[in-house]
Amino acid sequence: MGKNRDIKTQMNRLQHILEAHPYLGAILTRADDICLPNWYIAAGCIPTIVWNALSGYEKSKHLNDIDLVYYDPDDLSRTGEEKCQHHVAALYSDIPVRIEIINQARVHLWYEQHFERSIAPCHSAEAGINTWLSVTAVGVRKQQGQFQVYAPYGLNDLFTMTVRPNALLITEEHYRKKCTQWSRQWPGVTVLPWQKQNTVSVAANGEPTTTAWNTDMATQISTLEAIRHRNPLLHQVLEQTNKLLLPEWYLGGGCLAQTVWNLLSGFDPTAHITDLDLAYYDPHDLSYDRENWHIQQVCKAFQHLPIPVDVKNQARVHLWYEQHFGHPIQAYGSTEEAINHWPTTSTCVGVTIHDAQFSVYAPYGLNDLFGMIVRPNKRQITEEIYCKKTARWKRCWPGLHIMPW
């Protein structure tokens, strides 16, 4: 339910779950009355409600409060924040749990007192959300009737009940305490081990590198769709592959990220792109002969392109992976599961055309992509391969922010 699905499907599922909740539904129904700048319902209440739905629990189990964050740098007083608290409390007096109001512009003023470490001021509500764990780094709101989602790390962790550390603000001790509590409340939660290197963008409080960075997911999808038209190679492959009847296909990996990086760097959209990765999934015939037949069909269709289209059946990758990379892997259950394992978060993105609709699968979101942030996805890649790959990318795109292994 929401796992390994394209972004729009996940957003629709999230909207359905939240609007069906008696408290969140009431808040979203009257959202236009909130009248706070750059606000989101966010943090722990989102995974609580979603995990209750996934676990078959009562809708409000373990829901102690609802966090509503906003951003007002013009009033950093506690009094101003309290006025907003009273306004929202009066607006939703029929809701039996507390709605906690937090001005993200003033968090740095009290954070050290509560958590024994200082932080820099946030430049937006989104920048504050970027510093949270991926399952809580989800903000939702309604503006003029439109449901909007800000999720810089995607929604896959939320729907798979996977807790991943983000060491930018949280400490290891706090992370372990929070995960222990969640594991007791929802036994289906998977907790990933603490890794200090899993830090959010070095530019988390800097200026965005593109208008799609730190924006809601619908805006990011629209931006990516517009960008694919800027690269004629991507556009042609997307439009023509739909006619080749490849099962469960996606165009993805480096060619998407590199197109975005080229445009953000002022380069030609096709610069430094050496091939186009076309992934599909056919578990019914794992022979190389069948894969090669598809390869020949694709080569024939795109023989006029200046670079090759690399075609791989993701259902048979486990048959040759050890020979190429030195260690075995499990068979993938879908193209989406394969994308989950690709080397970096910014390249774990696949796009396809389904029923004439542009569709995006991005298990770790699109914020790293639009922020030119390269972060290792350690599910499969080795440190040696990551370092070689990122060194080459840094030479081509000096503006990349390379996260350490």
Image (cartoon, helix red, strand yellow):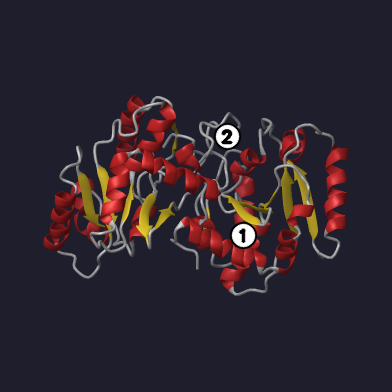
Seen in the image, is 241 located left or right of residue 349?
A: left
Q: Earlier in the sequence, mark 1 or mark 2?
A: 1
- For image coordinates 52% across by 48% down, the residue present is 153
The C terminus lies in quadrant: top left
Residue 162 visible in image: no
Q: Nearer the viewer, residue 155 or 161?
A: 155
Q: In the orientation shown, which residue stands out farthest toward the left? A: 289
Q: Which residue is mark 1?
A: 47
Quick one: label 1, few (<14), some, or many (20+) residues within 10 Å?
A: many
Seen in the image, is 126 located left or right of residue 386?
A: right
* Coordinates of residue 258 in the picture (x, y in percent): 35, 36
Amino acid type at mark 2: Ala
**Disc 2, SS:** loop
- For image coordinates 86% across by 50% down, the residue present is 87
Q: Which residue is mark 2?
A: 204
Seen in the image, is 274 located left or right of residue 345?
A: left
Total numbered circles: 2
Q: Nearer the viewer, residue 345 or 38?
A: 38
